[in-house]
Structure formats: structure tokens, C-alpha cells
Image (cartoon, rainbow, N blue to C red):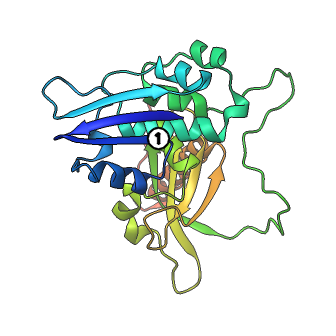
Amino acid sequence: MFRIHAEYQGNTLITDVPRDLYDLKEDFASIGYGKPLGETPIMPDEDSELELNIYPDGELEQAAFRKCKPEDTILMLNRTAQYLADHAYNFTAERIQEMNANGLSELYCRLSEPRQPETDKLVLQMKLVRRAEDFTPESCIVEDVIPLPPEEFFRLRNDPLSEHPMMEQYYEKMLSDDEGFRHGILVYDEVQGDGLFVAAEGADYARYAQYIPCAKDIAAAFEQTQTQEETAEIAEEPGGLIMSSF
């Protein structure tokens, strides 16, 4: 937990994070501060009317706070604090200190990376479902393939039920058709390669989603197959010509 002491235009706020984002916005609004928390640095400059003092409570929080940069935001602090609260059993202060992370955004990515066991066996990264009723798949149509920076992908992966601006951007591509097929987007971590199929169905969060290991490779293989088929069709057309270079 992090305790925040804020002062703005003579008004004082004391609150803690992690906290529901809407409640946190209301906390700051109660002292007259309305700027987006994603644009509010945890270390405001001298000209800012907002004064902040942040106190980490606990060894994990203290280790994480040492990774902060002045431009890290309240939103990023809240997100990191929530992840630490939910996964505290996975970390020690020493492990966090050893992470190669410059700022909370990079730290959030390092924290979110799946742990790698020391084994010579095959390791699969997946989301297991407890007491699943069945694993019968449905055919889902990918309307767009979107690479995302690790931090943005992890945010969607770790908190799919929160509001994500991407949902509005691709609204028309995430609907079910008259035949009952679900259409959606395939987003993937441009560094690590795993992804999510998302069908928001009119919501501003990932209403329907599934984790897709190796999504980047799957999309690349499909694109290569499509290119090969298109090339073959051109070659079969009258007058079609394929040039090879040696």
C-alpha cells in the first residue's frame, strides 16, 4: 500500500492506493483537482499547484518506489500497487530490487512477466480454468491483428474488465454476425509474442476474451500462407508471371 498526501489550492487529501480508479478520481476531485491521473506525475514540478507526498508501506512497496522516475504517474502507481497487492506471494523486496526496470512502467512489465521455473522440461504459458465445464471451441473471426507494447498488453491481460480506450476504436470490428460467428481483434505483446483474442461486443472492456499463446507467430504464419495463396492464384491466371531472383 502507498499513502498519498495531496494538497491543491488550499485543499488537502489523504488517501491510499491501490484503490478503485473511479474512487481515486473522486478523491482528487474532492479537492478540486480534475486533471487525468494518467497525466499526473507522482513528482510534480515546482510550478505545479498540486503538491504530492507518497509514503510506501511495506518492504515490497519500498523496493518498488525506489524504481520510480519523476514522470511516473498516479495511475501507474495505482496499477503497480494493485498488482503487488494481488501477487505479493510471488515477490520479495530483494527480487524487486534486482529487476532491471527504469520507472514504474518497466517495473510493471517485469512484475507481470510469468515466472520461469528452473527445469529442462517444456514450459507452457497459459491461463488455467478451475473446474471448467468443457473446452469446446467456437470459430472466432479475427478482423484485425494489433501489436502492443508490453505495458499496454499486460494492462489489458491483467485487468480485462477495466475500461480500455482500444475497445471504442475497434468497436465495429467486435460484433457477432447473423450466422452467430463472433468477430474480434487479436492483440499481442510485440516483444514476448503471446496475445488475446478480444470481442468487446459494444462494451468498453474485454467482454469476451481468450488468451492465445504464440499469437504473434500464429498471425505471421497465417499472413505468410495468405501471401503464398495469392501468389499462386496470380501465377495460375492467363498471362500470370512470377519472377525469381537467384
Q: Is residue 50 left or right of residue 75?
A: left
Q: In the image, is residue 178 above or below residue 170?
A: below
Give the residue drawn at x 77%, y 38%. 124
Give the residue drawn at x 44%, y 56%. 234
Secondary structure of residue under mark 1: strand
- Of the pair 9 and 69, the residue shown nearer to us: 9
Give the residue drawn at x 21%, y 50%. 32
Residue type pointed to by label 1: Asp
Q: In the image, is residue 183 above or below residue 100?
A: below
Give neighbour class at mark 1: few <14, some 14-19, many 20+ (Cα, 10 Å). some
Q: Is residue 151 left or right of residue 136?
A: left
Q: Is residue 70 left or right of residue 104?
A: left
Indicate the quadrant containing the N terminus: top left, top right, bottom left or bottom right: top right
The quadrant holding residue 48 is top left
The quadrant holding residue 198 is bottom right
Q: Please give the residue where the numbered disc 1 appears in the rendered image.
A: 16
Give the residue drawn at x 54%, y 27%. 57
Specify whether residue 202 is in view: yes
- Of the pair 155 and 222, the residue shown nearer to us: 155
Whole-percent x and y of residue 38?
32, 42
Whole-percent x and y of residue 113?
62, 32
Q: In the image, is residue 23 above or below residue 114?
A: below
Whole-percent x and y of residue 36?
27, 47
Extreme-bottom residue of the structure:
178
Q: Is residue 209 left or right of residue 36?
A: right
Total marks placed: 1
Specify whether residue 243 is in view: no
- Of the pair 107 and 243, the residue shown nearer to us: 107
